[in-house]
Amino acid sequence: MFQRFTLRTHLIYWDDSHFWMEHLFETKGRTVAISKNLAKGKNGVASTQDAFELLNHEQPTAVRPEKIEVLQETEELLKSLQTNSVY
């Protein structure tokens, strides 16, 4: 805690509404985090296409990495457990 580190972030995948970014916290070792993000505008959640347009970038085709597929499957499983819970 409270150590200096270098943070390297890059966009690894996107769909119609979300961006997934990988964050590398580099110090004496290497810790990796992946975050799922969305863009909001004055009219609510913006599509990734709208976000790319606002950045004056053409939206390239995204290839879903296996780790994102696993995260999405896990997220769906967790959602189903919450809705089917008896507690």
Image (cartoon, helix red, strand yellow):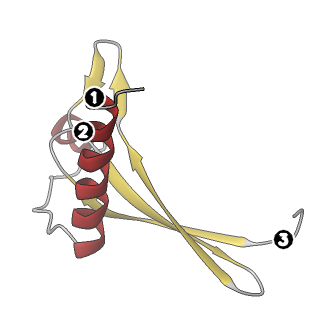
Among all residues in the image, which is located at the extreme front? 86
Nearer the observer: mark 1 or 3; the answer is: 1
Say which label, 1 or 3, has the lower sequence index: 3
Tell me whether the residue at label 1 lies in contact with that at label 2, contact meaning CB atoms closer than 8 angstroms: yes
Q: Residue 32, position in %: x, y?
A: 55, 72
Could you tell whether 50 is left or right of 74 in the image?
left
Q: Residue 44, position in %: x, y?
A: 31, 17
Residue 83 is labelled as: 1
Calculate the distance from the C-alpha at mark 1 to the C-alpha at mark 3: 42 Å
Q: Where's the C terminus, which quadrant?
A: top left
Amino acid type, mark 1: Thr
Nearer the observer: mark 2 or 3; the answer is: 2
Q: Residue 8, position in %: x, y?
A: 56, 70
Q: Looking at this view, is 35 or 7 the one in front?
A: 35
At 78% from the left and 87% from the top, the residue drawn is: 28
Residue 4 is labelled as: 3
Calculate the distance from the C-alpha at mark 1 to the C-alpha at mark 2: 5 Å
Q: Residue 40, position in %: x, y?
A: 36, 26
Amino acid type, mark 2: Ser
Amino acid type, mark 3: Arg
| Residue labelled with disc 2 | 80
Q: Looking at this view, is 84 or 65 the one in front?
A: 84
- Find numbered disc 2 in the image and state the secondary structure of the residue it sits on: helix
The answer to whether residue 54 is seen in the rendering is no
Calculate the distance from the C-alpha at mark 2 to the C-alpha at mark 3: 40 Å
At 35% from the left and 55% from the top, the residue drawn is: 20
- Find numbered disc 1 in the image and state the secondary structure of the residue it sits on: helix
Q: Residues within 10 Å of mark 2 (few under 14, many from 20)?
A: few
Q: Residues within 10 Å of mark 3 (few under 14, many from 20)?
A: few
At 28% from the left and 12% from the top, the residue drawn is: 43
Which quadrant of the view contains residue 72? bottom left
Q: Looking at this view, is 83 or 48 the one in front?
A: 83
